[in-house]
Structure formats: C-alpha cells, structure tokens
Image: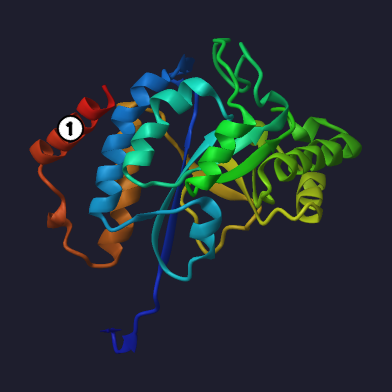
Amino acid sequence: MTHFGGPLRPQKKVLIFHYDRARRLCGRTRYINPARLPIFLSFLVFTLRLFGYKFRTVSDAMAEGYGKFACITFEGAYTDVARKVFPLLFRHNIPATLFVATGRVGRRRVVPQGIGPRRRTSGMSWAQIKDLVQKGWEVGTVGHFYTNLSERSQKDQFLHIQRAKDLIVLNLGVHPKVFAYPYGAYDASTLKYLREAGFTYSVTHKTGEVTSECLPLQLPRISLAASSFFNIAKLLRIIVKPIAADGQNLRAIASTTTATATVKAELTQIR
C-alpha cells in the first residue's frame, strides 16, 4: 500500500489502562467501588475490539513490532477487585498486568494504599497470584510496600525494589519485567536501581498513549475512572483518533443500541 507516492510504514499503538481505587474528580477524592468497574470494562473491551485493538500484557505489547494493542493493569493484588472484576477478563480471554506490593500479599483486613478513603480489604495469596500467572497474566510490582520512592534514601529504594523482585521470583518462579511507581513518584536513583534489578518497563501516573518517543521506564497510562462520564468521552477521543489518522472508516462503530445490549449481556453473566 502506498501513500503520497511512498510506502506506509507499519504503525504501532499501545494504550495502557489502569484502575484507580480512588480518583480526584471536581476537586474531591471519590472512591470507585470495584463492583462498578465491570460496567466500564465491558464498554471498554467492546469498543477497543471494535477498533481492532488486541489485548496484551504490558511486556508483550511493548515487544510487538506493529499493530494496535491495549493493556489493562491493576495496582495492588486485593481480593475485592479480584472477585468483582477478574472473572470478566477471564471470560474474554484478556491477560492483564498485576502490580503486587509483596509486603501485603496474603494479609487480611489491609487498607489499600494510595489515594482514597480507608476501606479495608484483603490481599491475595501467593497461590491466587500464581494461578493468574498460569492463566497468562503478567505480574509486576510496586515494590515491597506502596511508598513514595522519591522521598526514600538510595539504600531504601534499592532494598525496596530488590526485595520485591526476590519475593516474586521465590514464590512465583518468574522474573518481573514491569514496575509501577507508587503515587507516580520516582527519581534518577529509582531508574538506576530498576535497570540494575532487570526491569524492562515502568509505568507512571502520567496520562497519555504510548508513542515512539516514550522512554521504556517512563510509560504513560490512562486511568479507568469509572465514575466519570467525562473520562469516557476522553477515552473515546483517544481510541478513535489513531483510527481516523489511519483513514479507516469510522462508520464501523456499532450503534448505541447494539453497544448497550452487549454491555447488558455481560452484566447479566456477572450477576
């Protein structure tokens, strides 16, 4: 295929989504109940596949040569999210990337760290996480605990990253390749120790799609703020824009009635 007298180069588009337990909306921190997330994910999966995106883990998507790929990531391995959300992804055969705080694995009645109200839940066990790996999921880490790395000493950062990696290798038998910065905070020392520990990619809290200009250890993501209708409109613009640039027919979008029926069918299966 040619364009303006020359061949088109194969393009690669990667969208990395992540679930926030809480999100700053209209100047207030609002908790996003995991029970509401399947509604949003059903819409997201339907729309992305309609536009030709393939779901991959972060490492697999970044390793692909060209194509359109979507990744879903979760920070923290908590049982409430696993119970409400993961079955939907299993049914659609969608592998996700789970960022584990190794110091919280298997602990009961823990308070999820990050932004938001202090609502207690439980950490998944190593056996439950290993089952996800066997299903094709990827396990990364946020470190041993969810802490602001830019505020820690260089020694603390090194121990924090290395201990998390060692525990994942010991309990799961896999070497983690991806890291998520707690609170999106990091510095030059963090990048240095991640490279030394063998991490290939890291994701930030910066919003955007992954482009060729993005550094492997500073990849942007898109928040799954399910309680924000504005965020849904923003997501549609991000998803549709690359397709329009490719010159594909935007009339391939299904009608609102069809999309709604699909989402309702998914929710019926969830219940």
Mark 1: few, some, or many residues within 10 Å (few <14, many ≥20)?
few
Residue 57 place in picture, x, y as percent: 49, 51
- In the image, 42 versus 115, the foreground residue is 42
Q: Where, quadrant-wise, is the C terminus in this rendering? A: top left
| Mark 1, secondary structure of its residue | helix
Name, please, the residue furthest toward the right: 155
Q: Where, quadrant-wise, is the N terminus in this rendering? A: bottom left
- Say whether residue 145 is left or right of residue 43: right
- In the image, 160 versus 181, the foreground residue is 160
Q: Quick check: 118 above or below 265?
A: above
Residue 202 place in picture, x, y as percent: 64, 48
Residue appearing at x 63%, y 43% in the figure:
140
- Say whether residue 28 is left or right of residue 181: left
Residue 180 place in picture, x, y as percent: 63, 41
Residue appearing at x 40%, y 57% in the figure:
69
Which quadrant holds residue 236? top left
Which quadrant holds residue 154? top right
Asked if one can make out residue 227 in the rendered structure from this viewpoint, the answer is no
Residue flagged by tag 1: what amino acid is it?
Ala
Q: How is the image coloured?
A: rainbow
Residue appearing at x 28%, y 60% in the figure:
243
Asked if one can make out residue 67 in the rendered structure from this viewpoint, the answer is yes
Residue 241 place in picture, x, y as percent: 31, 55
Q: How many marks?
A: 1
The residue pinned by badge 1 equals 265
Residue appearing at x 75%, y 38% in the figure:
167
- In the image, 46 versus 238, the foreground residue is 46
- Say whether residue 200 is left or right of residue 47: right
Name, please, the residue furthest toward the bottom: 5
